[in-house]
Amino acid sequence: MSGKEQKSDARGTACGFRLKKTVVMVGMMGAGKTAVGRALAARLGVPFLDSDHEIERAANMTIPEIFERDGEPFFREKETQVIARLLAEAPGVLSTGGGAFLRAENRQLISEHGVSVWLNAPLEVLWNRVRHKDTRPLLRTPDPHATLKALYEARVPFYSRADLEVLSDGVSSIDEMVDRVLAALATRPDVLERT
């Protein structure tokens, strides 16, 4: 057994759970998928992966640069390829970009090989978290709040198809959010097993 596996086993046992399928965090930009996902992975002692980061690493470009150079359809195709590859690896926690779950192919991949967890944050919580960042290519518009609102309204029906939903209220700590996600995952013995 490698050191990495020993660490995962020890952490998984220490928290009282063993992860059997990859947990895929879905939801809007600013919902907390990366922060909560990273903390959840640490609590479970499993790898944390971010599909946007993996795309940037493979392309040696930032997401905004990919959007500008190759367009959104190209990015979405690469995103699907990366998600499929990451789901084929050992169980972990995967944070996806806000648009990933809209694509039927991604939802099917996630359903077959993992479990989707929607971090459901109200629009104003999202706006407060993203309004001062320029790393969101879809919000580079004359009225970013209106753009975010339109994206939110268009995407919520897709996110509501996730296997599990956890409220991201904007006031809970990351640890409290991890507790909520674990409570939701505990309802799925095919995903999370008590040790």
Image (spheres, rainbow, N blue to C red):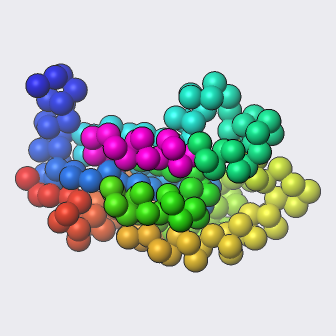
Work out whether residue 171 can be spotted: no
The residue depicted at 44 percent of the width and 47 percent of the height is: 84
Q: Looking at the picture, how far across and down is residue 57, in whole percent?
A: 56, 28
The residue depicted at 11 percent of the width and 58 percent of the height is: 194
Q: Looking at the picture, how far across and down is residue 132, in whole percent?
A: 75, 47
| Furthest residue in direction left, as rendered | 195
Image vertical order of residue 23 relative to residue 74, above or below: below
Relative to 103, 150 lies left or right: right
Relative to 109, 41 lies left or right: left
Image vertical order of residue 25 relative to residue 35, above or below: below
The residue depicted at 58 percent of the width and 64 percent of the height is: 102
Relative to 181, 133 lies left or right: right
Relative to 47, 107 lies left or right: right
| Pick the front one: 128 or 117 | 117
The residue depicted at 12 percent of the width and 44 percent of the height is: 13
Write down the quadrant of residue 180 in the picture.
Answer: bottom left
Q: Any magenta on residue 75? A: no
The region drawn magenta spans: 79-93
| Pick the front one: 172 or 134 | 134
| Furthest residue in direction right, as rendered | 142
State which quarter of the image contains the N terminus: top left
Q: Main secondary structure of the magenta part?
A: helix
Q: Looking at the picture, how far across and down is residue 134, in whole percent?
A: 76, 42
Q: Looking at the picture, how far across and down is residue 159, in whole percent?
A: 53, 70
| Pick the front one: 59 or 92 | 59
